[in-house]
Amino acid sequence: MAVEELQSIIKRCQILEEQDFKEEDFGLFQLAGQKCIEEGHIDQLLEIIQNEKNKVIIKNMGWNLVGPVVRCLLWKEREDDDKRKVYFLILDLLVKLCSPKELLLGLLELIEEPSGKQISRSILLLLQPLQTVIRKLHNKAYSIGLALSTLWNQLSLLPVPYSKEQIQMDDYGLCQCCKALIEFTKPFVKEVIDNKENSLENEKLKDELLKFCFKSLKCPLLTAQFLEQSEEGGNDPFRYFASEIIGFLSAIEHPFPKMIFNHGRKKRTWNYLEFEEEEDKQLADSMASLAYLIFVQGICIDQLPMVLSPLYLLQLNMGHIEVFLQRTEESVISKGLELLENSLLRIEDNSLLYQYLEIKSFLTVPQGLVKVMTLCPIETLRKKSLAMLQLYINKLDSQGKYTLFRCLLNTSHHSGVEAFIIQNIKNQIDLALKRTHNKKWFTGPQLISLLDLVLFLPEGAETDLLQNSDRIMASLNLLRYLVIKDNENDNQTGLWTELGNIENNFLKPLHIGLNMSKAHYEVEIKNSQEAQKSKDLCSITVGGEEIPNMPPEMQLKVLHSALFTFDLIESVLARVEELIEMKTKSTSEENIEIK
């Protein structure tokens, strides 16, 4: 019945001129053709499409059948091979015979339809037909831009495989799609290369390809993990995709060295105004991704000039590292840390001049490392960030270290980080005391100014000592070191001049705070012991935070641990005060003897 209906419609349309086809004819043709497919009359449908007499009708109306045919290929995988071959023949003929303009829109709608794992199957099925259709069109730049944008939007919905096993399994087909997308794009890149006239249309085509390259650098390449080169054996899909994208950039006259060196300058690199919005949205992530691919993965690195200094390369990459560290994805943060390590290892210790800290990213990157150290839930990244912060500190000159320490003490607001910085200050003082020159920043007035940020309690005696215990212990250890190493008569560090202020602002409030804290926790222990007898659950306050419904046994462990911390602080404090007394007494006796 469906075949007869379709033949009847075609017979009526055969006697009409092309311009006389009515909207009603299109609708009837689509319904009858779709019914033929649904009822399985695909051999007869193929014959109708192949019939030369129906060429004009198929050209104008046939594109309506592409959707039903594609859906059958996607959803009826279990059909026998002979039927699938007929579906493919019908699709090929429709692509060959139908209006390319209508086909383009129809194919893009079909690509946008699926979700989940069907996205990649749809793309892999339709890329070749889509390429054929676009090559027939005259307004190629617009068509390619529309197609690449649609394809990228769909691909960006797919999860990026993370591990080697996930990449090999490629459950969602992203890796296959990336490879197929390169093959889809290659003819259009070649067209740009072959067109020597540099016409306006060719320039627009370059821009569309450039936008696609930038989008690809952001997704999937920003988050994609790369296999170890020893493991990949030339089969890393993302490395292949990245290499081809960077190759495309050079082919369309935007070689990556030029892009990297121009990035961040006030002068716009792009010619077309419409691209500036795209640039603002994509460029930071895309350029960071490009820098990682070149400097860490070594893709096309041989195209960079060999004369570039390590300091210049670090300055080039710090903005990109900042972009990486602002993200929350594990793979992206990891790339930022790798790029930072790669850049810093090229530089000698103590050679990074303090003036570099006047560049915004040279301060925001260490602050970004602190955020990863304190907020990231992944231990390996926290440890790596700590190691990178130490490596960064090692590369700075003395004034640079001093400036960074002041900055991080003022901005980190984390006891553990502050303890880490204070330990670094102690190390620098130790080096300065052993030197005969270049010791200005960690002795005398400059050091005293820095110690003002270290040897004090943020809220005086009311400071939460448990929450700040790491910082307090590090400060006491630093003070103990200074008292031992610097004699009152030498006073190289300036400690003995400032001792009165240190006692008033740090040691005395610490004594009071310890007495208050120990009294509070002793009361809490007594309450917990009483609760243990009654076997009730109750809450306690530790470090300023209430811990509800904790079993009494666990409460006692927490409370005793806090008391142990206070005892430890108290013992170090007592030792510091004992050393101060011994040193001042010894100096007084020496002075009396001299007199």
Image: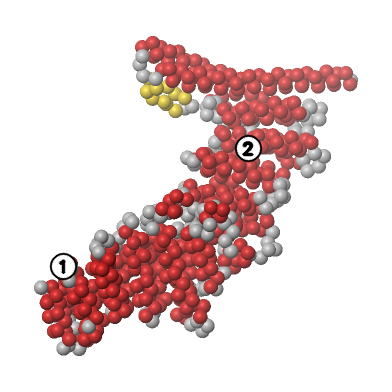
| Residue depicted at 26% across the width and 71% down the height | 86
Q: Which residue is mark 1?
A: 39
Residue 562, given in percent of the width and then of the height, sits at 52, 22
What residue does disc 2 label? Answer: 421
Q: Position of residue 306 (x, y in %)?
A: 68, 63
Q: Amino acid at mark 2?
A: Ile
Secondary structure found at label 1: loop
- Residue at the spot 61% in from the left edge and 42% down from the top edge: 387
Q: Residue furthest right?
A: 595
- Quarter containing the N terminus: bottom left
Quarter of the figure with residue 539: top left
Q: Quadrant of residue 144?
A: bottom left
Element at label 2 = helix
Name the residue rendered at 54%, 36% in the picture: 414
Give the total of numbered labels. Answer: 2
- Observer-side mark, 2 or 1, equals 1
